[in-house]
Image (cartoon, rainbow, N blue to C red):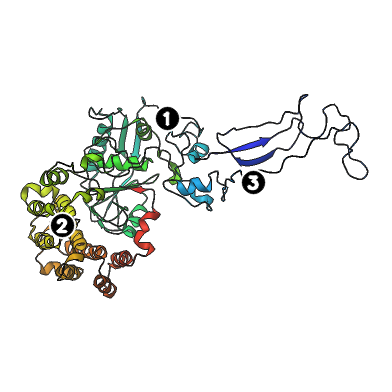
């Protein structure tokens, strides 16, 4: 990455300083022209009494005491021109290739740009702009200057819950205490550093009414992120936060905006809260050990490295700026989730489905699914022994391209009874999404018709759904299932699904309909989560 610096041309007797910005690598902060006795700079000798004498004609005196020099050579056209269209100190190429990228012609988008020349965990912009976050030198690797690892750092966080979500001050305090204890605990299975971080509640838990207790589209998540509190609690999230990738959707436990705030589901474990707060601090995913607190999909984690410890011991970046962003971006699931060549399909399915994930079974793993996977997955789907992993089984079924799984997926949703656990509701949600994926191969279109009917909340009452989950029971549960049906139609890729969606007019479901239509028509808004590069689950 090309770094930028500023050169200052100075003469000892000059009053003005000429500042020129040029590309350089490595940077050299100052270059001073020495006009001393040995200097050959300029066209005038040092001992010339008539230096810069101006004649009557206004021309420089070209007497015998003036030493002429050869004219400078023409510029070398082969030297590449380093463009910085917006003049923000980052080259156009660096801005375009940064993760996340930015607009080379917009100087206001550089503030969250994670270009970090020295890899010390603090962006170049923040090192130059904010006193106290970093060492101030974007070319000096010194992560220890970000924070004193021996000194405790306390985050006093404001917390809000949706009006329909139950979560008390005491519950927040318990999660915060457990999260701090996880960071202070030293992990033995992975490289880890004890981190003296304390989370405390700033005032009582407040409430908000926007977005919803369950979030199924990015616009709802946008509204919740606009709530000013640092932590926002909802009941359920599906298909938001841009995960697992832009052409997919899954159940999500939490989502964070780097340099901003986090949105978390009420039943998420303390390590997920800490993971999301790590994203707020600017950390990215790190997948080299399954116990890393910043692992892209693992739960039950606590390990941090020096960069992450520094982030958890540093004040939150101000004004939405990212202060720490050096951890490598996750490039997908670790190899240990992939099926070994000699591993029986049934054993591999059990191994993957038995795990908990922050955002569903990673999409990349699904390429190992084969036809022989369908029967063991169907056996596991509604089996009592797998009630805690039903969402993983349903999600995997959706990638088998086996429409015969649809009947089994459909029948289990109304068969649920009583108060559901999070995993049971997540299993129902992933089942509906799986039916959307599988409907493309259903020759009699029964799955597609089932989803179309399910777009109306009344259909779920007629199907006998009587169970509940926290604030979602009765009509609220039926409306959630109807919204999920609409989103599943967007995954179907079917022209009939598009026609049905375009004919729908259900009050309160406009966002879901628009998102599903956009996904089917491949419009820009179908990929709108890419406009939120600083959000991560």
Above or below, 290 relative to 506? above
Q: Residue at point 22% right, 51% down?
A: 367
Q: Residue 49 falls in which quadrant of the image?
A: top right
Q: Residue at point 50% right, 47% down?
A: 93
Give the mark nearer the N terminus: 1 vs 3: 3
Query: Can the viewer see residue 276 in this picture?
Result: yes
Disc 1 and disc 3: Cα gap in Å?
Answer: 40 Å
Disc 3 and disc 2: Cα gap in Å?
Answer: 64 Å
- The disc at residue 428 is 2
- The residue pinned by badge 1 equals 143
**Residue placed most toward the observer, 381 or 402:** 402
The kind of secondary structure element at disc 2 is: helix
**Residue 265 rendering spot, x and y as whole percentages:** 24, 49
Q: Residue at point 42% right, 48% down?
A: 100
- The disc at residue 77 is 3
Q: Is residue 31 left or right of residue 357?
A: right
């Amino acid at each position: 990455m090309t770094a930028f610096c500023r050169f200052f041309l100075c003469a000892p007797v000059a009053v003005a300083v000429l500042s020129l910005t040029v590309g350089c690598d490595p940077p050299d902060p100052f270059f001073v022209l020495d006009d001393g006795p040995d200097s050959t700079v300029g066209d005038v000798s040092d001992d010339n009494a008539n230096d810069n004498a101006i004649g009557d004609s206004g021309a420089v005196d070209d007497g015998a005491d003036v030493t002429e020099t050869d004219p400078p050579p023409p510029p070398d056209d082969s030297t590449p021109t380093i463009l910085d269209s917006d003049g923000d100190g980052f080259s156009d190429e660096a801005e375009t290739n940064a993760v996340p990228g930015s607009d080379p012609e917009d100087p206001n988008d550089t503030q969250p740009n994670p270009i970090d020349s020295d890899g010390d965990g603090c962006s170049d912009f923040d090192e130059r702009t904010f006193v106290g976050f970093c060492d101030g030198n974007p070319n000096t690797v010194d992560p220890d200057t970000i924070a004193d690892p021996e000194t405790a750092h306390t985050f006093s966080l404001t917390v809000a819950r949706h009006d329909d979500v139950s979560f008390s001050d005491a519950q927040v305090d318990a999660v915060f205490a457990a999260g701090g204890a996880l960071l202070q605990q030293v992990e033995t299975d992975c490289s880890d550093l004890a981190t003296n971080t304390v989370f405390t509640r700033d005032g009582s838990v407040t409430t908000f009414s926007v977005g919803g207790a369950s979030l199924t589209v990015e616009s709802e998540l946008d509204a919740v992120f606009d709530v000013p509190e640092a932590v926002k609690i909802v009941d359920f999230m599906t298909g938001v936060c841009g995960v697992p990738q832009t052409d997919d959707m899954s159940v999500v436990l939490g989502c964070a905006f780097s340099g901003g705030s986090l949105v978390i589901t009420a039943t998420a474990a303390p390590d997920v809260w800490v993971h999301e707060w790590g994203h707020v601090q600017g950390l990215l995913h790190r997948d080299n050990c399954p116990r890393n607190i910043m692992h892209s999909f693992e739960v039950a984690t606590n390990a941090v490295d020096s960069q992450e410890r520094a982030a958890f011991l540093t004040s939150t970046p101000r004004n939405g700026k990212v202060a720490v962003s050096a951890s490598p971006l996750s490039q997908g699931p670790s190899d240990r989730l992939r099926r070994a060549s000699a591993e029986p399909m049934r054993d591999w399915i059990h191994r993957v489905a038995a795990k908990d994930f922050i955002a569903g079974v990673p999409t990349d793993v699904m390429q190992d699914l084969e036809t022989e996977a369908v029967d063991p997955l169907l056996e596991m789907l509604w089996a009592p022994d797998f009630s805690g992993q039903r969402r993983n089984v349903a999600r995997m079924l959706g990638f088998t391209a086996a429409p015969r799984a649809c009947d089994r997926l459909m029948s289990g949703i109304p068969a649920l009874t009583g108060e559901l656990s999070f995993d049971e509701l997540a299993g129902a949600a992933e089942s509906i999404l799986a039916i959307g994926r599988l409907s493309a191969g259903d020759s009699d279109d029964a799955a597609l018709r089932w989803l179309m009917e399910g777009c109306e909340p009344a259909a779920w009452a007629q199907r006998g759904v009587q169970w509940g989950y926290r604030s979602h029971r009765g009509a609220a549960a039926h409306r959630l299932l109807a919204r999920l049906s609409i989103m599943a139609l967007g995954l179907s890729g079917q022209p009939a699904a598009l026609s049905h969606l375009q004919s729908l007019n259900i009050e309160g479901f406009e966002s879901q309909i628009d998102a599903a239509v956009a996904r089917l028509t491949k419009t820009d808004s179908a990929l709108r989560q890419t406009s939120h590069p600083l959000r991560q689950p």
